[in-house]
DNA sequence: CGGGCGCAACCATCTAGTTGGTTTTTCTGA
DNA sequence: TCAGAAAAACCAACTAGATGGTTGCGCCCG
């Protein structure tokens, strides 16, 4: 385990290298040797600090979730809600690793539990509860369904770049193209949020 | 190449086995030996008919796209539009392979062209044009952005089952849970479509 | 009889993880 | 304050098994 500042620095280097490698190649396609090369740290240190490849992958997912939680605040007001889809989209645009890692993880584990099950569940439950307050919705389960729809709306194009590129055309990869996509997604998010707000106002 | 009925049957068996294997494990995680085992066909036949692992993966993507194109019609009317998100969702619910394969492919190739670039592009352009007619939208690029939003809405939960399970709770995997999710996604799709129809009616 | 199909064994390379050390850093007791 | 011991960190080489792809043959059918 990394117990000294020097060890912590080594661990950080390994996590950063692993994040890039797993984001690009996923669990199965990533190579431990390449992670060591990218980090400039001996491969054996990976096993000393993390145990095995799967545990390293899990540590990377925790790291990027921590970053997103710190960077994109959970919306607790109506205005926060309106901004949320755009913020998630911008986060993916700027830091492309989390959404890819989430997708690699989902495809890899499918119906099996993820290593980080409890922490992740707590994170999502916390988000859903906050969203139910912002939406004025009594049922956090309903808020959770809205949440997953909004997250899906903002995240989907980053999972399937081939679909985005071929469906939206070559101009889609310009700044203007991204802005059009972003504006459309935000508008769609707004109409979803507005319809839920209307619905909860009449309940 | 499979030139006789017997050869065609072998090729079909290989493709079906490959579809299951690639859907579960992706390009990097799939094993050619396991594909042979699942199909009951000798491994050497894979190389005789497809050339290599990547070409087999591409053939599987073509196969599942052909199936989806035949099963979920491109909406050309307003009613067709309203039904579309639910149809995509139901398609994924019943045949879970395509959406996973699409995601594996997207993550794997990222910004690089896919092997099946031209056919896929034609398929998407065809869809976007049909959608622009159904939406009464002059610009197929705008229709394409709506299309990718609707597809994302319907597809996202199938890519990230861990997020669905932990965000929506354990009941989400019951028939009732799936129906609630489905109804919410359809409702969201409707408000998106309605807002675009309103927008294009006032243009 | 030739082409298509099929087979088990094989090959060269790759891979996650381990090993048997060395080096560096920290701590403790004199 | 320093020397020595112990702990932490580090290394290159290794291991056992896995892997995509190939080979040299035999069988079947038109």
Image (spheres, coloured by chain):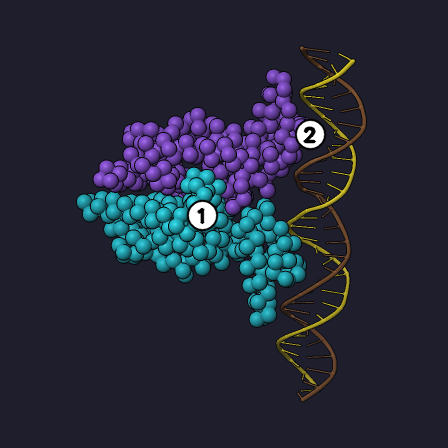
Chain colours: A cyan, B purple, C yellow, D brown
Residue located 41% across and 52% down the image: A175
Badge 1 element: helix
User: The N terminus of chain B is located in which quarter?
Assistant: top right
Q: Is residue B125 above or below residue A32?
A: above
Q: Report if residue B66 is visible in the image.
A: yes
Residue located 40% across and 28% down the image: B72
B82 or B94: nearer the eye? B82
B151 or A44: nearer the eye? B151
Badge 2 element: helix
Residue A95 place in picture, x, y as percent:
46, 56
The residue carrying mark 1 is A173
Disc marking residue A142 = none
Mark in front: 1 vs 2 = 1
Q: Is residue A77 above or below residue B39?
A: below
Looking at the image, residue A11 sits to the left or right of residue A202; the answer is: right
Please, which chain is the residue tagged with disc 1 on? A
Residue located 44% across and 25% down the image: B70
Looking at the image, residue A105 sits to the left or right of residue B54; the answer is: left
Residue located 55% across and 50% down the image: A24
Specify few, some or many for label 1: CA neighbours under 10 Å numbering under 14, 14-19, or 20 or more: some
Q: Is residue A173 above or below residue B198?
A: below
Q: Is residue B104 above or below residue A133?
A: above
Residue B45 place in picture, x, y as percent:
66, 27
């Amino acid at each position: 385990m990394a117990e000294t500042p020097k060890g912590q620095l080594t661990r950080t280097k390994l996590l950063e290298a692993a994040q890039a490698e797993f984001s690009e190649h996923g669990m199965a396609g990533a190579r431990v040797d390449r992670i060591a090369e990218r980090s400039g740290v001996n491969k054996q240190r990976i096993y000393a600090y993390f145990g095995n490849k799967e545990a390293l992958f899990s540590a990377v997912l925790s790291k990027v979730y921590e970053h997103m939680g710190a960077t994109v605040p959970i919306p607790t007001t109506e205005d926060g809600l309106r901004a949320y889809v755009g913020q998630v989209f911008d986060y993916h645009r700027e830091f492309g690793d989390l959404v890819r890692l989430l997708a690699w993880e989902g495809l890899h584990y499918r119906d099996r539990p993820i290593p980080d099950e409890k922490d992740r569940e707590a994170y999502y439950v916390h988000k859903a509860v906050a969203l139910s307050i912002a939406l004025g919705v009594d049922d956090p389960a309903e808020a959770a369904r809205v949440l997953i729809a909004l997250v899906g709306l903002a995240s989907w194009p980053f999972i399937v770049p081939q679909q985005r590129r071929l469906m939206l055309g070559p101009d889609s990869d310009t700044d203007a193209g991204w802005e059009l996509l972003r504006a459309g997604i935000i508008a769609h998010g707004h109409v979803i949020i507005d319809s839920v707000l209307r619905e909860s106002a009449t309940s």
